Amino acid sequence: MSLTLWNSRFCVTLVRRQHATIFTSSASKTIAANSLHHTFSNNYQQQQHRNLTTMKPTNTAVAEKGTSRSSRISADGSTSATGINVPPFNHPHCDRQAMYQQPVRKIKTLRGSYDYDLVVIGGGSGGLACAKEAVANGARVACLDYVKPTPIGTKWGVGGTCVNVGCIPKKLMHQASLLGEAVHEAAAYGWNVDDKIKPDWKKLVSSVQNHIKSVNWVTRVDLRDKKVEYINGLGSFVDPHTLSAKLKNGDRTITAQTFVIAVGGRPRYPNIPGAVEYGITSDDLFSLDREPGKTLVVGAGYIGLECAGFLKGLGYEPTVMVRSIVLRGFDQQMANLVAASMEERGIPFLRRTVPLSVEKQPDGRLLVKYECTETGEIGSDVFDTVLWAVGRKGLVDDLNLPNAGVLAHNDKIQVDCDEATNVPHIYAVGDIIHGKPELTPVAVLAGRLLARRLYADSDLRMDYADVATTVFTPLEYACVGLSEEDAVKAHGADEIEVFHGYYKPTEFFIPQKSVRYCYVKAVAQRHGDQRVYGLHYLGPVAGEVIQGFAAALKSGLTIPTLMNTVGIHPTTAEEFTRLSITKRSGLDPTPASCCS
Amino acid sequence: MVITHNVKGYEEFAKKMEELETGDGNNQVHVLFSGGKDENGQSWCPYCVKAEPVIHDALKKAAENSHFVHVDVGERSYWKDLNCPFRKDPNTHLVFLPTLLRWKSPQRLDGERCSSKDLVEMMFEDED
């Protein structure tokens, strides 16, 4: 109490005097040194608050956008919530104005009577980021991580989905596939290459797995170095402050003031005969000890398409089975272009088709029976591998959430804008939370910001809007902001202008690569500032192209700014600065010649 | 009991590793690379000096019958040459001195981390 008073008095001094005066002031030098940090951070916060309040009125476009988007999202949420026995849990998720008006909740009883200040359940991207940041800010932290083996016995180390069975191995296999393509192109560029190049699956898998294992090791060293206690165990709640961890050698009871659930998700299996016995998922593919061969990829979300894409590039024969739409949740015009670009490369798509059964034939190959949902026609084909990419399920089951009073929303957990669940001292980040992008960097930032709010006097919340992402199909697709249909839903078709154009990457000419699907579009406000709501890019190195534009979009990019930006020639990213044709004009969006 | 080997220079190192791989391929081999010592037994590499006692102390945590190879990389000028064979060998890819690693495994510590008792013990005890 007295300290606070003293601090506030000190604040006043700080405003009136120069910093130097304070440092050299003779009175109680040590106390000043100790509390300087507090004073500065308080001051900094006040400044931030001021910035936020002043930002709001001038930034009405953002506020409006946020509001209308959040109303759309909550509308979706209530539809999906019907029939589920969960009370309505409405929070201003993406409504930035409402979000900043709520005070950040502070529970900061460090060094309480619990074993730990914080226990993070899950050692993936979100959990680790949160745990490390909490330790850095003085909390006593334990992080639990446990991987249940897949039905065929695949298991892996610490680090979660991204490092072990997600982004990292996926990107490496995608790269392997692009390199194969590049070798073929190299001939046109004058390299004398043997045109009978052949991939070595086992070599690839071992290179990829070696990389993953060294990342696992580095992660463990980092945890030990940063004094995060790593517990290789499966956690389940006993009561709201107690966890039981199932370890290799028995159980351990752990108590904590605060919990962060960051258990992530795992692939689903369809409920058909033979699915679990004979099928594999992305959890198994990157360490598969045999060549995948002719592969049926069931599911056309980004995981299915990426797997099919690199398998094709590596010389295997993937087929994609699509139940309804391709890349649900993404801009559908772009999604269909992605699918078409894959079909052009010789990947067949079985549309409106669902699998019925998988049987193992005497020769070891897999007979898959399937049905066309439109015609009811039954078909079948034989494959070497069946890969389920039919969605992912949040790992709520092992947590024993009812013991803690945490409500699950199907297999996910709903959180408010502080990432708190319905139980105030239990938080959740990453793929386990409901209705947010399931992306590593989202989990990392959310986890880190959460730890700072809990232990470092920060007020900063995670902004889940306008997160850029990339689909690593052979021709890559990256986007940031709204899809065309979401923009239309949010603002009305009359208020939206879509700029678009096909383009020809310079380096595609010599090897005569297809430019048919190289396409960019900007979805923008039609009147007023012409704010850019969303950017979409289909072409090479899409992630590298869109990342910078994501920062621009978050800074309030407008069409005039984009048009006034000078491109880097010759690149594909510069196509965003050359967008001049609107869909409304009906003009031909196919490319003009270079430099015109 | 951990079996300790001391080798000097790249050729001795390469020979020793080949010998261990063919003769005793099943047991773990930990390798410490450090800077060469002068006539007073003092290494030119300060972190190596710091790491050595920590590592030797932690060795008792290593698996029964595992091997520990202490490699004297050589003089500073030899090591600083970017074409130094220790840097080029795909199995070592040395960038820092000291480096402590488990042969043909992901476990690896370098620089200051080699003098952290906690981390060094973690490496010797690691079962993966």
Image (cartoon, coloured by chain):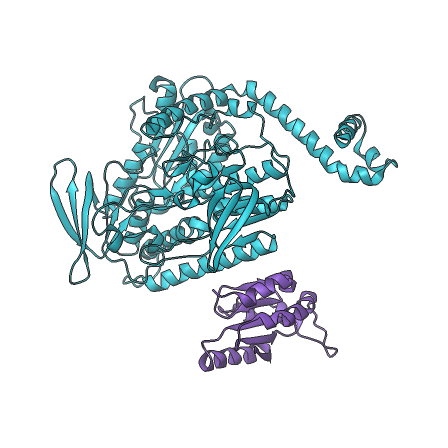
Can I make out residue B92 in this image? yes
Front position in the image: A494 or A467? A467
Question: Is residue A98 placed above or below B56 in the rendered structure?
Answer: above
Apparent side of residue A36 relative to residue B63 in the rendered image (left or right): right
Residue A421, x across and y down, in percent: 48, 34
Q: Quadrant of the N terminus of chain B?
A: bottom right
Give the image location of residue A167, x and y in percent: 41, 48
For residue A60, above or below residue A264: above
Supply the letter of whichever chain is cyan. A
Which of the 4 quarters of the picture holds residue A570? top left
Q: Residue A528: x percent and y percent?
A: 45, 17
Q: In which quarter of the image is residue B84?
A: bottom right
The purple-coloured chain is labelled: B
Q: Which of A19 and A586 is in front in this view?
A: A19
A1 shown above or below A173? above
Quick one: A315 or A426, which is closer to the camera? A426
